[in-house]
Image (cartoon, rainbow, N blue to C red):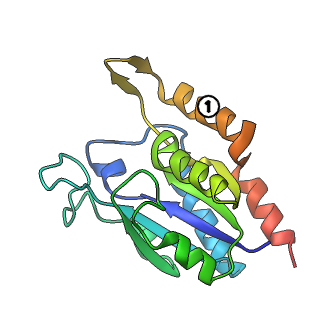
Amino acid sequence: MKRALLVIDVQNEYFFGKLPVSYPPGSLDNILKAMDVAAEKQIPVVVIRHAAKVEASPVFRKGTPEWQLHPEVEKRHREVLIEKNWPDSFMETNLEEWLAANGIDTLTVCGYMTQMCCDTTARRGFHLGYGVEFLADATGTLLFANQAGTVTDEELHRAVLVTQQSRFSRVMKTEEWVSGVRAEP
């Protein structure tokens, strides 16, 4: 098995912008821990950053402070930074080519938001034939309300995790992942 850690959209928008992540508590700490352990174990780290396709977008406008990576992610080691415009980190990016060129067969997903870019990327990875690990406490979301209804942050997060585990990913906590990768030769 040769894995890569995908750190998806850990950007200031989710901390200081219009989409403050509220669940689960400690998700950023777990993302940073996964990044640190990946560096320690020489697991490639792929940082992915979202930019709105529309310049007038109220969120993720390229070049704004909210679009920037969280400072703690920015200062950590990464092999590559991939820019994306869609919830699917593979769509119109070089992610698939980079993974193939580096012999990656397993993706470990962390970042934001659980139900959007993390879920979409994990599903696409599964459909492309990758093994997928989904870090339950190193992904996160917030309360959502729209014309279809309202769902709490905890309900939304749990529903995605249950769905991921049912078919697409091996869902685990960061500590379980850390123990597993540290136990590998």
121, 142: nearer the viewer: 121
* Rendered position, 9 above or below 76: above
Q: For the point 53% across and 76% down, which residue is it? A: 97
In the rendered image, the vertical position of residue 89 relative to residue 75, given as above or below: above
Say which quadrant the C terminus sits in.
Answer: bottom right
Residue extending farthest left: 56
Helix, strand or loop at disc 1?
helix
The total number of labels drawn is 1
Q: Which residue occupies 17% across, 48% down? A: 57
Please identify the quadrant where the N terminus is shown: bottom right
Question: Is residue 15 shown above or below 97?
Answer: above
Residue 132 visible within the image: yes
**Nearer to me, 161 or 72:** 161
Residue 81 percent across, percent down from the top left = 43, 75
Where residue 43 sits, quadrant-wise, is bottom right
Q: Is residue 52 left or right of residue 31?
A: left
The residue depicted at 35 percent of the width and 23 percent of the height is 145
Q: Please indicate whether residue 16 sits to the left or right of residue 55 in the image.
A: right
Find residue 44 and report its horizontal and vertical position in percent: 62, 77
Residue 175, x across and y down, in percent: 74, 55
The residue pinned by badge 1 equals 158
Work out whether 29 lies above or below 79.
Answer: above
Q: Residues within 10 Å of mark 1 (few under 14, many from 20)?
A: some
Q: Position of residue 49 (x, y in %)?
A: 38, 64
At 59% from the left edge and 52% from the top edge, which residue is drawn? 122
90 left or right of 37 in image:
left
Residue 70 visible? The answer is no
Q: Quadrant of residue 51?
A: bottom left
Query: Is 163 in front, or is 181?
Result: 163
Q: Amino acid at mark 1?
A: Arg
